[in-house]
């Protein structure tokens, strides 16, 4: 670990994230098996695969929730340094410019929508608890500043009318939106979304597709997403990587992936299903 | 020397500044106004008792409520915000009470004795917090239970510190070396400290810190992904909870002027827990209400009514805590809220009816 | 040697008390997914039943113990059906708080039902020269043999039951995953009820065994309960036998410490054992038997 930090890594120009030979095992089960792919700057990238293919596990590896894994994950961070994410603690990942959502939303139900967004800006706050106890000038100014920012994002997502309502009791589609809005608070370079369209109805999904592209353009970031809704994935992604049983199947444009025999087989099965 | 002075200057400016903003906030933020009302209300009780409209002992009862509100606020931060269970609260209150007495017998003035006690408590809090980084869930809850047990053994056995079963006597505090407080002044002092501790909690919880605590307890992984350092905030919550408990203990010794070892047992811890749960998790005024319900109501009403039946206070608290957890998880502080809601509904209903009536005519 | 033997027997006896209590705790923990902090209080409550029947109604010890077992089973059923099962939605800490609330309720109810005076309860086999046996210079009462034997037998029966019967299988699968088990048709409701009843009887038995050392009173199970919980964390909550092993270790080490340490230290024997266990936990946070699982995100 320690000698890794001094190593310098390289990334091709225009590449944001490069995963090389990633493997992750749980006991006897190899959830991710020697997987490699890269994500370009300003790109929407889809990771697809049947249930249990290991998609969430890949996300957890990138964001360092799992420690004992093989392979390296190179990232061009906020300061334009090329780093290996494996050297970064899970709680510091967001500072590098990488932020994620969770498959099962994971918002704070007993906080208002806007306060949930402010948690996304946690690492941007400079004041400490002494400042908070005395409500120092800086602490209050920061609070106002990030509240304004949160409101702006909520407006962008067209849910600013909900800002002071509690998260508990909001419909699922709204929860998903709040989750995405929260990621935008940290000025990310790469947003990782785990099944953003799951549980949404058709109109909501169409709206989300538009939103993805708007986010990419307005916030100048890349998006890595996992989704089972093929229409959605094919519609918004610039490139897609398909995996099955943790192994690489194919990588390319939506059209290429659609026609790829291995992908079709993985989804439709051969004779045994 | 100059550096120290400039630093000192900075601090005074800082405090002045935040004070000024607080004063202006009293005008705009309803919460601050409520703090002021509570302070005034508590002191009206003192006045009433001086005027013999209320019992002399009522003041003593409210002092207890004030002290345990502070203690329960700390537990509320730990349990309500950070989702961590501690079963050692009573031990820390006891430590605060014995600590201030002990250091004053060593010749330190009140403020310094309190400060030393608080500093030691901070270190104990850090130790418990560090422990909590490795040990989780039930294992942690049971460990705090053991910490409480260790404290109670210390109170019973370490004679130089606690005078064992004899207990230790104390006096009303002397502030700044010359302001000798009497019973009433001590009571005012207590209520002032309580309101300050409430404001501190209010500020803390309505800030990045409070949000981080909530994020941590509601979803560990999501908090980590947002950059919340779990270890930092766990340590923080334990230290804060233990500090509140210790300050409560110091005030206990200051008002009641006698500390004895058997008071700081698991039962007290459980009652403090009941105060938090029954009053309302995460709620500052709920905590006060909880202490009033669990301690005040039995003392003021039940024990007279049911003087023939012992244990009725416990029965009351125990049933209340269970009922609240099962059916009213936001605590009794929400009753007012719910009544308001009902009332509003009723009003709207009535207005609609009126409108409908208008249409008929 | 004789001293050691004496200590060994004493440890086996206190260890059995801790073990009975902690086996109950872990049974409930695994099937109801909550820590029953009221384990000791439930024992105390039913020990009061036994003591009252014996002292005030004149029943013999051999009659009051089964009677207390029956009331213990009823207590367990009531707690499970009235409080724990309906509270499934309130979350883990909520359920823990309910059991903590139960402690307060029981402490409130005891003086109401049984009065405020402590009640003595005799041993199963009263200690007298004719009821002792001397082995290698150590004098051991028949009662010790009886209580140790009974505890071991009962716990053995529970392990056999869990390991080899259909109901035991149901307990094990409920312990590993309640929701799946319920979907698979395991009667999880009855399983938790059995667990609560068993836990309550074990807690009661523990209380009845220690009662003769002092008297039956509200605080009798205080430190025993803490030791039982410590036995659980020491042995780990992940197996049924871990806490039992933990219980005997705690009993043995605190008895040894109390005897072999110099007098100024020996009063601290329990504290020393607690501190040692805390230190141990710091390095092995899930107990002797138990491994840390990879958290699913
Ligand atoms: N913490 C863990 N411990 C053990 N096994 C795990 C863990 N996390 C995931 N797995 C296993 O790894 C495999 C891949 O799981 P993963 O959640 O990554 O799949 P997925 O592609 O996200 O599936 P889905 O589309 O259903 O979300 C599965 O077989 C799962 O059971
Ligand atoms: Mg997944």
Image: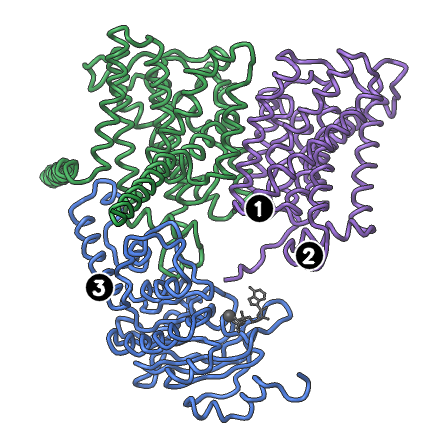
Chain colours: A blue, B green, C purple
Crowdedness of circle 1 by 10 Å Cα count: few (<14), some, many (20+)?
A: some
Q: Quadrant of the N terminus of chain A?
A: bottom left
Q: How many marks?
A: 3
Residue C19 x, y percent position in the rendering = 72, 36
- Whether tag 2 and tag 1 are in contact, CB under 8 A, the answer is no
Q: What mark, if any, has residue C88 been given in the picture?
A: 1
Secondary structure at badge 1 equals: helix
Secondary structure at badge 2 equals: helix
Name the subunit of mark 2: C
User: Residue sitting at 24 percent across and 32 percent down?
Assistant: B34
N-term mark: 2 or 1: 1
Residue B11 shows in the view: no
Which residue, given by chain and number where applicable, does mark 2 sit on?
C181
The residues bearing labels 2 and 1 have C-alpha atoms spaced at a distance of 16 Å
Which residue, given by chain and number where applicable, does mark 3 sit on?
A152
In the foreground, C157 or B294: B294
**Badge 1 and badge 3 in a common chain:** no
Q: Quadrant of the C terminus of chain A?
A: bottom right
**Badge 3 and badge 2 in a common chain:** no
**For residue A44, what is the image quadrant?**
bottom left
Residue B238 x, y percent position in the rendering = 41, 40
The residues bearing labels 3 and 2 have C-alpha atoms spaced at a distance of 48 Å
């Amino acid at each position: 670990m320690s000698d890794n930090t001094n190593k310098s890594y390289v990334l091709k120009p225009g590449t944001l994230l490069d995963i090389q030979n990633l493997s992750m095992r749980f006991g006897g089960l190899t959830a991710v098996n020697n997987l490699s792919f890269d994500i370009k700057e300003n790109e929407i990238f889809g990771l697809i695969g049947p249930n249990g293919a290991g998609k969430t596990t890949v996300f957890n590896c990138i964001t360092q929730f799992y420690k004992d894994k093989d392979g390296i994950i190179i990232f061009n961070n906020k300061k334009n340094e090329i780093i290996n994410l494996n050297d970064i603690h899970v709680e510091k990942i967001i500072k590098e410019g990488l932020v994620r959502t969770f498959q099962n939303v994971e918002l704070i139900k007993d906080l208002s929508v806007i306060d949930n967004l402010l948690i996304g800006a946690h690492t941007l706050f400079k004041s400490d608890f002494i400042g908070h106890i005395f409500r120092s000038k800086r602490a209050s100014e920061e609070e106002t500043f990030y509240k304004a920012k949160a409101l702006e994002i909520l407006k962008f997502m067209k849910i600013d009318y909900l800002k002071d309502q509690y998260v508990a009791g909001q419909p699922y589609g709204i929860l998903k939106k709040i989750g995405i809005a929260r990621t935008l608070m940290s000025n990310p370079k790469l947003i990782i979304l785990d099944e953003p369209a799951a549980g949404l109805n058709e109109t909501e999904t169409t709206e989300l597709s538009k939103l993805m592209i708007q986010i990419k353009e307005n916030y100048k970031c890349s998006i890595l997403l996992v989704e089972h809704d093929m229409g959605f994935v094919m519609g918004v992604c610039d490139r897609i990587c398909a995996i099955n049983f943790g192994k690489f199947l194919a990588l390319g444009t939506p059209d290429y992936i659609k026609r790829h025999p291995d992908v079709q087989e993985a989804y439709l099965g051969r004779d045994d299903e | 020397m100059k550096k120290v002075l400039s630093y000192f200057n900075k601090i005074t400016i800082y405090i002045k500044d935040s004070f000024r903003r607080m004063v202006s906030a009293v005008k705009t933020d309803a919460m601050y106004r409520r703090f002021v009302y509570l302070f005034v209300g508590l002191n009206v009780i003192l006045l009433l008792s001086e005027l013999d409209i209320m019992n002399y002992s009522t003041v003593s009862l409210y002092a207890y409520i004030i002290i345990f509100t502070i203690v329960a606020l700390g537990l509320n931060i730990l349990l309500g915000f950070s989702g961590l269970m501690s079963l050692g609260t009573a031990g820390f209150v006891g430590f605060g009470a014995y600590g201030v007495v002990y250091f004053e017998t060593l010749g330190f003035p009140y403020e310094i004795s309190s400060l030393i006690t608080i500093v030691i408590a901070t270190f104990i809090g850090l130790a418990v917090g560090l422990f909590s980084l490795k040990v989780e869930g039930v294992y942690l809850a049971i460990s705090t239970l053991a910490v409480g047990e260790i404290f109670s053994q210390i109170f019973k056995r370490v004679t130089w510190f606690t005078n064992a079963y004899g207990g230790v006597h104390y006096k009303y505090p002397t502030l700044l070396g010359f302001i000798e407080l009497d019973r009433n002044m001590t009571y005012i002092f207590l209520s002032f400290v309580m309101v300050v501790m409430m404001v501190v909690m209010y500020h803390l919880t309505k800030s990045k810190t409070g949000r981080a605590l909530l994020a941590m307890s509601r979803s560990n992984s999501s908090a980590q992904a947002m950059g919340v350092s779990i270890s930092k905030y766990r340590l923080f919550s334990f230290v804060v909870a233990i500090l509140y408990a210790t300050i409560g203990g110091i005030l206990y010794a200051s008002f009641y002027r006698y500390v004895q070892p058997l008071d700081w047992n698991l039962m007290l811890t459980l009652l403090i827990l009941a105060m938090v749960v029954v009053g309302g998790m995460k709620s500052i005024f709920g905590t006060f209400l909880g202490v009033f319900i669990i301690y005040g109501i039995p003392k003021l009403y039940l024990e007279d009514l049911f003087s023939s039946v012992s244990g009725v206070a416990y029965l009351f608290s125990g049933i209340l805590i269970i009922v609240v957890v099962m059916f009213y998880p936001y605590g009794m502080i929400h009753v007012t809220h719910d009544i308001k809601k009902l009332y509003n509904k009723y009003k709207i209903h009535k207005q609609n009816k009126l409108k409908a009536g208008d249409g008929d005519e | 040697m004789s001293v050691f033997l004496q200590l060994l027997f004493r440890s086996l006896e206190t260890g059995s008390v801790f073990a009975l209590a902690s086996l109950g705790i872990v049974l409930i923990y695994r099937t109801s997914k909550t820590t029953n902090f009221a384990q000791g209080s439930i024992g105390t409550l039913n020990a009061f039943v036994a003591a009252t029947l014996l002292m005030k109604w004149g029943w013999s010890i051999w009659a009051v113990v089964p009677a207390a077992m029956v009331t213990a089973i009823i207590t367990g059923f009531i707690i499970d059906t009235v409080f724990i099962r309906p509270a499934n939605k309130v979350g883990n800490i909520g359920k823990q708080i309910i059991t903590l609330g139960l402690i307060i309720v029981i402490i409130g109810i005891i003086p109401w039902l049984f009065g405020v005076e402590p009640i003595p309860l005799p041993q199963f086999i009263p200690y007298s020269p004719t009821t002792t046996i001397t082995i290698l210079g150590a004098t051991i009462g028949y009662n010790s043999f009886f209580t140790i034997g009974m505890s071991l037998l009962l716990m053995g029966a529970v392990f056999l039951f869990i390991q080899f019967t259909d109901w035991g299988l149901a307990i094990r699968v409920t312990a590993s995953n309640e929701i799946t088990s319920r979907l698979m048709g395991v009667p999880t409701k009855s399983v938790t009820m059995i667990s609560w009843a068993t836990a309550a009887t074990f807690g009661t038995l523990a209380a009845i065994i220690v009662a003769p050392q002092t008297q039956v009173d509200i605080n009798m199970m205080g430190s025993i309960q803490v030791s039982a919980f410590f036995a659980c964390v020491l042995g780990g909550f992940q197996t049924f036998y871990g806490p039992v092993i933990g219980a005997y270790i705690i009993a043995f080490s605190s008895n040894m410490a109390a005897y072999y340490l110099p007098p100024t230290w020996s009063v601290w024997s329990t504290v020393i054992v607690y501190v040692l266990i805390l230190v141990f936990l710091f390095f092995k946070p899930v107990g002797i038997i138990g491994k840390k699982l990879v958290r699913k995100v």
